[in-house]
Amino acid sequence: MKNILTVENVCKNYGNFTALNNVSIAVPEGSIFGLLGPNGAGKTSLIRIINQITLPDSGTIYLGDEKLQPHHIQSIGYLPEERGLYKSMKVGEQVLYLAQLKGMSKTEAKKKLLYWFEKFEITDWWSKKIQELSKGMAQKVQFIVTVLHSPKLLIFDEPFSGFDPINANLIKDEILKLRDEGASIIFSTHRMESVEELCEYIALIDKSNKILDGKLNDIKQQFRTNQFEVGLLSDNKEVLFSEIETKFKVQKSKASINNDLRLLIDLKNGETSTDLINYLNNKSQITHFTEIIPSANDIFLKAVANNG
Amino acid sequence: MGKLKLIIKREFLAKVKNKSFIILTLLSPLLMAGLFSLIIFLNEKNSEETRTIAFVDESHQLETVFTDSEHTKYVNLTALGLEMAKVKTKEFYYGLIYIPKNDSLINLSKGVAFYSEDTPSLSLLSDIESKLEKKIRNLKIEQLHVDVEKIKATETNVNIASENFSGEKSSKIGSLLRMAVGGGFGYLIFMFIIIYGTSVMRSVIEEKTSRIIEVIISSVKPFQLMLGKIIGNALAGILQFIIWMISAGFLMLLVTSIFGIETASSATSVGQMNPEIVQQVQQTSASELQLVLQEIKSLPILTMFFSFIIYFLGGYLIYSSIYAAIGAAVDSETDTQQFMMPVLMPLIIAIYVGFSVIENPHGPIALGFSLFPLTSPIVMLMRIPFGVPWWQIVTSMLLLIITFIAIVWFAAKIYRVGILMYGKKPSYKELYKWLKY
């Protein structure tokens, strides 16, 4: 698959502090790419380098096939984590100004702007000043600023912060729609449930190093722990539990609704899920059987802890 | 280039549309005119007031001194004696002059006293003193049997008209004119740099605190943004300046046409008090007016005009880029204090030096500070009306341009790093580190 963005061996130092240490990532075209990492890991440094706000000390970046050049800013839309607009400038004027700075003509920007304003039902905000808008309203304007010039690559840094659930959903749908229309999206966030929901690919950065990247599903495979949750019907739960305990590594799980015995069983090397089912089936009636798949959150915590 | 133009336009409009800018621009000429009229008005009122002063002259030799003038009337209370006169003066008059009994002319001047309820003004006292001095002097001359008129004929008034070797005339009035023009230009640049430099700084801080900066510099280079900001603000300043000049001229015309006649009449009333001086003024005023016009013509106007533009641009660009860098380095305006002092220092020194330079425009201090690029925009402009050798102007301009390039380069580096730094109050050491990023 073609990559819209390729970052190769990028290093960035601020004085004695290393912000990025030999980081490489590849963002496939038309995908949503989650850029994850704890606070201060170097995500923002990387995003700023992609946006050409700062230059890397070494390493190369390609947008499509071309080496990143100043004119590429027109193909990139960036929603920074710290939002901001000119407080005393009117909404319409402001968006037009920022769009023109991205290289759009005034008439083109105006046309697009009307389209987005109608879509978000905010046409009457045109001559309001930003300081008269609520935080969520200003966020909507900022979202429009980011996408107005139809960039090939969109970079969202915590796009849902500051939105209520309804508007967060609206923005999420717009992001998905933009992807369907062919844009590629880099998505930096701490909210793991939205990573789970949206991202096809992820990269995890911790302490200036990339410690993990790839397709989210592949990573999940990699982080499988072979742990299963099972539910068993039994009249004498304690006897059954101690019986299973002799055979498998087992612990009690939370109580369930139909009052069955819930267990978490870790399979050792060589044991398969079929072995487990067969064994349990002989013992009792099975009400529940699932593999515990690590969530993005678990992977995040585990990978960061391992990087220690 | 297109983007720079966009930024300049936005910065200009943001400044010009600002309410405080509009109010300041429109109101200050009115305020100035109002203040000016008030001063004239109060002056008129003050001089219209007449007061009556009593005197007791026990020597009986100085009574003739006290003749009534327009604003002062005199009453002779010698007959009442000092104590009674005091009581009466307290009740009816402004003050009481007491001249004790004295037979010898030499001691006549001693023991003269003035009694009044409130402290008399210095000008009133010196007026009375000079009247008495003159009378006593005349009495002494008479005692020597010399004709007073003959002594008067020996009094002369010298007005040196100096000329330099290339034949240009200069005079005291000419130097005064040069001082006024040079000082005015220098002061104008000083004010403009401080007002609009601070405005650039505020605008940078605003972008930083409102966090729009990251959005903008993902579209344009920080240097473009800084330059656009500086130029946009300068244009707003020039607009304000032009509006002020036009309205000041207009209002001046208005004010003088309202008060014109009265000021003329008050001039004659001053004249009545000192008839001799009036005579001199009348004699010289015609020729001096011509002299002033001549002086204006002899000023190096073209040089002044072009150097004003160059020094103005150079000075403003140097200082406003320093201001922009300061704005970028801090998080809020309260943090700017530690950096403001070193920036204001050379400007304030330039103004102080400048005003001593116009007294001695060709001395070593004048030369040094008019070459040093952080003070040259002010000091050199103050010197130019007095005539400065070409090599000095060229050297000073070259230094100014080199410094301008260096400072803008440094400022841009600090600006570039600073606008993305939050939460730290930077030290000078920190700023030095930023230069190397």
Image: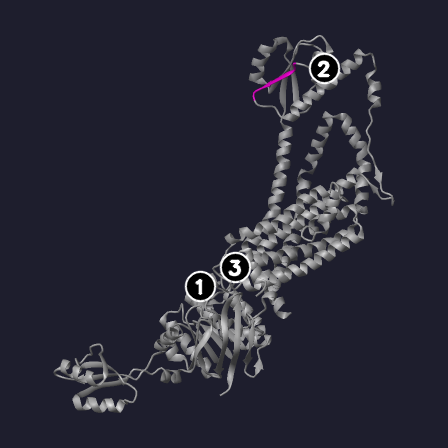
Looking at the image, is mark 1 or mark 2 nearer the viewer? Answer: 1
- Give the spatial CA distance, label 1 vs label 3: 18 Å
Q: Would you place residue A155 above or below residue B331 in this image?
A: below
Residue at numbered disc 2: B64
Residue type at the position of mark 3: Glu
Any magenta on residue B116? yes
Q: Secondary structure at mark 3?
A: helix
Q: Which residues are magenta?
A: B111-117
Q: Is residue B51 left or right of residue B180?
A: left
Q: Nearer the viewer, residue B400 or A85?
A: B400
* Residue A95, disc: none
User: Same chain, marks 2 and 3?
Assistant: yes
Residue at numbered disc 1: A133
x and y, in percent, of residue B270 in the image: 71, 29
* Chain at numbered mark 3: B
Any magenta on residue A54? no
**Residue B218 seen from this side:** yes
x and y, in percent, of residue B14 in the image: 56, 60
Q: Would you place residue A152 above or below residue B427 in this image?
A: below
Residue type at the position of mark 1: Leu
